[in-house]
Image: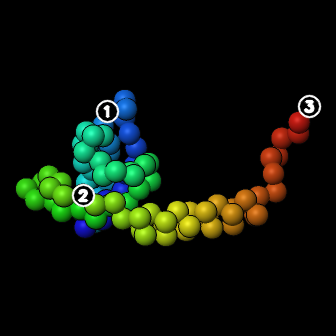
Amino acid sequence: MKGYLDRIEENKFAVILVEEIKKEFIIPVAELPVGSAKKSYFDLTIENNQITSMKLNEQATMTEQQKVDELMLKLRSKSKGSKFKKN
């Protein structure tokens, strides 16, 4: 199962989103795999409603970031700028 590091709260807790089961898990930051950062993807094992294993998936993280970068580039190229004038 895949999970996504959505955010870190109070520098103590990591919020992992698992879209497949539409659930979020809150774990201590210390339990994140080495190299984890916001927007990282993980391969997860979930048993009894708890994450029992977590491995950083660098390939999925890179692929998803490329998709986001491409979408942002498209959006920016379509933008005609602000409708407000600068003084």
Label 1 belongs to which residue? Answer: 12
Separation of marks 1 and 2 at Cα, in angstroms: 18 Å
Tell me how far mark 2 sits from mark 3, CA to CA.
Answer: 52 Å
**Tag 2 residue:** 54
Determine the residue positioned at 34% across, 50% down: 34
The amino acid pointed to by label 2 is Met
Local packing at callout 1 (Cα closer than 10 Å; few below 14, some 14-19, many 20+) is few
Placement of 31 over or under 75, stated as above or below: above
**Label 3 residue SS:** loop
Label 2's element? strand
User: For this view, does 11 lie left or right of residue 52?
Assistant: right
| x, y percent for residue 27 | 24, 42
At horizontal 42% and vertical 68% (from top left) the residue drawn is 60
Please state, as top left, top right, bottom left or bottom right, where the C terminus lies in the image: top right
Tell me the tag on residue 73.
none
Q: Give the residue displayed 38% in from the left and 39% down from the top.
A: 8
Q: In the drawing, what numbered circle is on residue 87?
A: 3
Q: CA distance from mark 1 to mark 3?
A: 43 Å
